[in-house]
């Protein structure tokens, strides 16, 4: 299949079952295609050069949302639009519905999937460019070069993971089902990510995320993001919080931040557990968030702003959830 003149040639196969998909994905260089809203732009820019692209959109078993009491299993190809519009998801896991509704624009949400969002590539202003642009600066560590334009003294890639769903799923203590030719394993959503912008997923070659599993909610939750263009953009920073507040004070809080590094950051909340939710506690959380995230110059927006905005989003969301 060829999408346009600059797109590499590859074989495109439509899998009818998970078994067929993982069999094909065992081929070196094979890649998954779900909604294609992240993969296809990367193919067109020559950032990906797969041998085979395996489309999983036709696998019936991956497209459902199943409930057992208040626990939920969401198939990998459920679209973000469906997730955002599902009334039971919105009332049980508000953070997840809000995160799904905040992804890109309507076209991205109607094609984009849960699995694709979790596995979307990291992003950097020096990398997500056409081949001509990248060639003019000689490539970079992530592809085609030997220097990082963000941190030229370093030897690692700082490209940022910008998926909106991941922090919500991490805050909600979700697990993932991961299938391969060798079988199925389960992993915590937080363990999907590595601190390396050039290889940020802890999936083995040929592995496919097939479902997300959520336990019953433990309190309230929410997601907020800051972006340049409110109608379409990736997060400059996105914050999810799952919160349980007792009679007088916070009993449990999980805070996760996206868009600020190669993997979502889980912020330590010991300092706010046991406290009432007031201005002082919100300011304490903002400080903890700002100390925990270390965005680099991977966007046109200054890193210091992204760090500050992450703290502000967390403080505001905490107040909103507690109210
Ligand atoms: C203009 C624009 C704006 C965007 N804004 C946002 C935004 O605000 N927030 C955001 O989160 N994203 C954004 N995106 C990125 C993208 O649209 C979403 O992340 C989307 O959810 C990706 O899902 P998909 O199904 O289209 O993934 P695909 O493009 O099909 O796949 C993405 C990656 O995941 C892999 N993959 C897909 N499914 C699986 C699976 N089940 N198991 C293992 N690997 C898999 C693919 O091989 C590929 O590497 C934007 C994209 C564009 C072009
Ligand atoms: S952070 Fe550095 S190595 Fe990574 S994509 Fe950007 S310029 Fe390239």
Image (cartoon, rainbow, N blue to C red):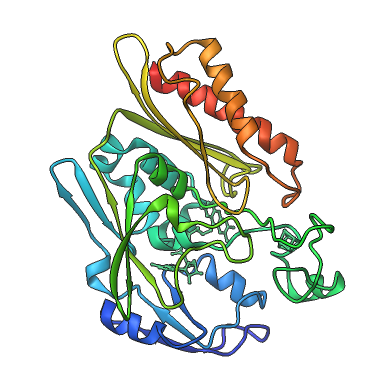
Which residue sits at x=34%, y=64%? 77
In the image, taking residue 301 as reference, residue 68 lies left or right, namely left
Which residue sits at x=84%, y=57%? 153
Residue 158 coordinates in the image, percent (x, y): 69, 55
Q: Is 238 rendered above or below residue 120?
A: above
Residue 27 coordinates in the image, percent (x, y): 44, 88
* Number of marks in the rendered image: 0
Which residue sits at x=36%, y=58%? 79
User: Depth check: 100 or 157 in front?
Assistant: 157
In the image, taking residue 268 as reference, residue 17 lies left or right, namely left
User: Depth check: 129 or 28 in front?
Assistant: 28
Q: Quadrant of the C terminus?
A: top left
Which residue sits at x=57%, y=51%? 162
Residue 262 coordinates in the image, percent (x, y): 60, 54
**Image quarter of residue 194:** bottom right
User: Depth check: 152 or 34 in front?
Assistant: 152
């Amino acid at each position: 299949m060829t999408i346009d003149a600059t797109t590499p040639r590859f074989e495109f196969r439509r899998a009818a079952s998970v078994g067929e998909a993982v069999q094909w994905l065992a081929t070196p260089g094979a890649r998954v295609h779900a909604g294609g809203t992240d993969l296809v732009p990367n193919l067109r820019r020559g950032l990906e050069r797969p041998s085979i692209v395996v489309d999983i959109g036709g696998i019936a078993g991956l497209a459902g949302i199943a409930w057992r009491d208040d626990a939920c299993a969401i198939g990998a190809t459920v679209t973000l639009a469906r997730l955002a519009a599902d009334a039971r998801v919105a009332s049980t896991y508000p953070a997840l519905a809000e995160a799904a509704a905040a992804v890109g624009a309507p076209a991205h949400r109607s094609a984009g999937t849960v699995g694709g969002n979790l596995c979307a590539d990291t992003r950097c202003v020096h990398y997500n460019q056409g081949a001509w642009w990248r060639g003019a600066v000689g490539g970079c560590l992530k592809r085609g070069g030997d220097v990082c334009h963000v941190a030229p003294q370093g030897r690692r890639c700082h490209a940022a993971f910008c998926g909106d769903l991941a922090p919500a799923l991490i805050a909600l203590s979700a697990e993932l089902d991961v299938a391969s030719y060798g079988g199925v394993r389960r992993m915590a959503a937080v363990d999907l990510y590595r601190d390396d912008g050039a290889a940020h997923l802890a999936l083995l070659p040929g592995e496919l995320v097939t479902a997300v599993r959520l336990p019953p909610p433990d309190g309230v939750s929410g997601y907020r993001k800051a972006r340049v263009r409110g109608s379409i953009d990736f997060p400059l920073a996105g914050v999810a919080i799952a919160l349980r507040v007792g009679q007088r004070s916070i009993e449990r809080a999980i805070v996760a931040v996206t868009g600020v590094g190669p993997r979502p950051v889980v912020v330590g909340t010991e300092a706010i557990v046991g406290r009432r939710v007031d201005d002082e506690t919100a300011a304490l959380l903002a400080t903890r968030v700002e100390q925990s995230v270390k965005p680099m110059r991977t966007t046109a927006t200054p890193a210091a702003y992204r760090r500050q905005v992450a703290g502000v989003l967390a403080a505001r969301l905490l107040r909103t959830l507690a109210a």
